[in-house]
Image (spheres, grey):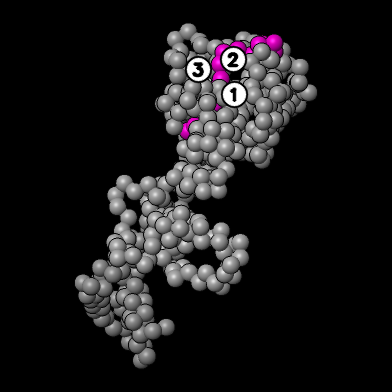
Amino acid sequence: MSPRSRGAKRIADALGRANPPNLDRPLLTQSGFSTTTTTNNHVCRSCRQALSQRRYASTATAKATVEAPPITQLSPDGPEASSAPQPIYTVKAGVVVSRPPLITPDPHPFETAYYLYQRRLNERLVLPFTQYFYYKRGTPAFEHWRSHRLRRGGTATRDIGEYNAYTPESWNDEALVGDESGLQTKIVQDLIAEEGRAEEFTGSGDPKFAGLKRRTAADDENNQQSLERSLQRTLYLLVKNKKVKGQSESESWKFPSGTIVGFEGLKEAAQRILFSSLGPNMNTFFIGNHPVGHYVYKFSSPQPRLAASPAAAGTTEKSKASEQAPLKQQLAQEGDGAMIDGEKTFYMKARIMAGQADLAVGKQNGVDIEDYKWLSKDEVEKLVHPEYWSKIRNMLVAQ
């Protein structure tokens, strides 16, 4: 024990004596005589403060040691943590069917300027062109190349042309504002016209309309039910459900969805809903077994559960859960008069490769779908309700 600790122990022993300070006590000496002495237990102020703080700390620790409350057992057979009733939702499965882009997107103006610069730079770096290394003088290939070079104004390459390094104005080689030499359509027209194959593409020989078109007749007519539009964008299938009283026009446009029946999985339910509502004529495949997002819609007041459609009832494998542990989904399905607080829709991702939706099949199966559209992400935002858009926007790609 350190000297400092021994000193503190002596002070504590002195304060712990039963007799008050300055009390006369008889002492017995070795010679046997009884004497009386005065004990002066003087403690400095700093030591008294240190000892009092230790005493208060030990007292607070003793008061803080209380018995821990019992932990509530949360088990299927035991009591629940809260006696408040939990809301019951109808679990639904939805499908986000998309058509991927068929062509590359239009280049950004900066990309167009960059590619033009690279082509011009490559054209200047190939000069002077060693023609005799590639073509032997007097051969048909040499004469063919020389005729094309003269037609291009002495330019060796055909990407841009119109540049001759051996003229007095060769130094003035800057691309001016508004120059269309770097446009993709201009390059395609020049290449097709040079090869003399314009008639194979248009039949009229006009190189202005040569090549594959990036806009189709569906784009010109704004036919939003056609898959042959917006070839450079991803299109999504939206359906218009039957309008309910008090519902706005934007609230009726949503992705295809339906109620899960029995013990169906999300993917199985999504496939059944897609085929029963829009027909089997769409060549689709589902990507993954997990949903890409969900949407929770809470009613303003509890509503009775609607009866399942005949198409959904025909695919039910099991309609009852175990009596020991009933599911909330089963409780929501027991009786048409059960009160539902809202809907939870989990969306699966799917792709369409060919085919088209058929509303006649949905009407035969009792599905109330009035219309459908293939829209890009920007068009979806303008059509659906803002609250619905805030929940689904992260499930859609920008391109």
Give residue 270's quadrant in the image: top right
Type of amino acid at the residue the image marks with label 2:
Ile
Q: Position of residue 71 (x, y in %)?
A: 56, 42
- Please state which of residues 398 and 257 is positioned toward the viewer in this rendering: 398
Kind of residue at disc 3: Ser
What residue does disc 3 label? 252
Q: Is residue 23 visible to the viewer in this orientation of the structure?
A: no
* Whole-percent x, y for residue 56 in the image: 33, 60
Category of crowding for the residue at label 1, using alpha-carbon neighbours closer than 10 angstroms: few (below 14), some (14–19), many (at least 20): many
Question: 159 or 46: which is nearer to us?
Answer: 159
Q: Secondary structure at mark 3?
A: helix
Extent of the magenta region = 363-377
Image check: 315 left or right of 330? Answer: right
In the rendered image, the vertical position of residue 382 relative to residue 146, given as above or below: above
Displayed quadrant of residue 250: top left
**Rendering coords of residue 362 (x, y %):** 66, 15
Q: Which residue is mark 2?
A: 369
Answer whether residue 133 is visible to the viewer in this image: yes
Does the magenta segment cover residue 364? yes
Q: Quadrant of residue 28?
A: bottom left
The crowd level at tag 3 (other Cα within 10 Å; few <14, some 14-19, many 20+) is: many
| In the depicted structure, whether residue 324 falls above or below residue 310 | below
Q: In this view of the protein, which residue sits in the foreground, 112 or 347?
A: 112
- Kindly indicate whether the residue at mark 2 contacts the one at mark 1 (C-beta within 8 angstroms): yes
Judging by the rendered image, the residue that carries numbered circle 1 is 256
Secondary element at image label 1: loop
| Spatial separation of the CA atoms under disc 3 and disc 1 | 11 Å
Residue at the image position 44 percent from the left and 60 percent from the top: 155
